[in-house]
Image (cartoon, rainbow, N blue to C red):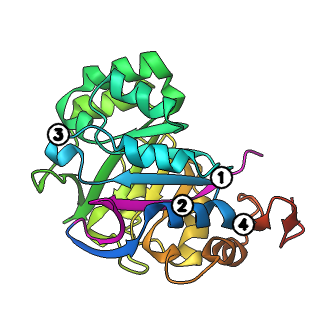
Amino acid sequence: MLKKRLMGVVTVKDGWAVQSFGYRRYLPLGKPECLIENLDRWGADEILVQVIDRSRCNREPDFRLLESIGKLGLATPLIYAGGIRNVADSVKVIQYGADRLVVDALLHDDLQAVQHLSARLGAQAIIASLPLSWQEGRIEWFDYRTQTRTAIANQVLSFISSGVVSEVFISDFSHEGQANGFESNLITNFPLQDVPIVAFGGLSDPNQIRNLLLQPNIVAIAVGNFLNYKEQTIQTYKQAISSAQLRNPVYDSSHSLLTHA
């Protein structure tokens, strides 16, 4: 059985790793390289670095940060988000060491550019980010640059279902940073039930994470803020979730805490 993933998320703003609450309030954590190195050492299945102040200002991806991360010699697959505007940006992000990338603003602005990214890098390398909220029985799509909410455009849904991207990163933006706040209606009522989904935002409770992992369209759970309160939280989560669908928790490449495969 193909294992599902527990992804560690590092949010970066103004060059610093931050805790993010609802896409509007931030608390500094320190140098992003330190958090990324810890997630790699603690056995995250993937690491997502999302730089949230690039697309808002039409700035290029944070290549300085990517270069610095590249020197860490990570063993964990790296995903990058932030400031990707075109094929040239995306190719350079991969050349700097990212394995995959996330697009958000381009889904609002230029679907053809996403098509070109996919043609150049392959759909497997592209993840579509959809910040969503559940309001009065319907899903709303958030544009963090303009702070506006709309229905997900049918054109975007058709685009995603065509296979141009490999996964959809559904972020419950209104509950981001709120313990046990994730709104499961975002998953059960998402219009595309046959696309692989990564769930993020307010996921702190192992029971809720375990239940989400049981859903066939959930391929990964992403956790950000809640990994920063204690050391080795990745292993603690994996032990508490105790799902055969996740890789065993490890402290390093040779020591497992559990015995099941």
Residue 246 spot, x, y in % from top left: 71, 59
User: Secondary structure under badge 4?
Assistant: loop
The amino acid type of the residue labelled 3 equals Asn
- Look at the numbered discs 3 and 2 and tell me whether their residues touch, using CB distance below 8 Å: no
- Look at the numbered discs 4 and 1 and tell me whether their residues touch, using CB distance below 8 Å: yes
Vertical side of 101 occupied by 179: above or below:
below
The residue at which mark 1 appears reads as: 4
The amino acid type of the residue labelled 2 equals Ile
Q: Which of 197 and 34 is in front in this view?
A: 34
The amino acid type of the residue labelled 1 equals Lys
The residue at which mark 4 appears reads as: 243
Q: Which mark is residue 58?
A: 3
The residue at which mark 2 appears reads as: 36
Extent of the magenta region: 1-23
Residue visible at 54% across and 54% down in the picture: 47
Vertical side of 35 occupied by 67: above or below:
above
Number of numbered discs on residues? 4
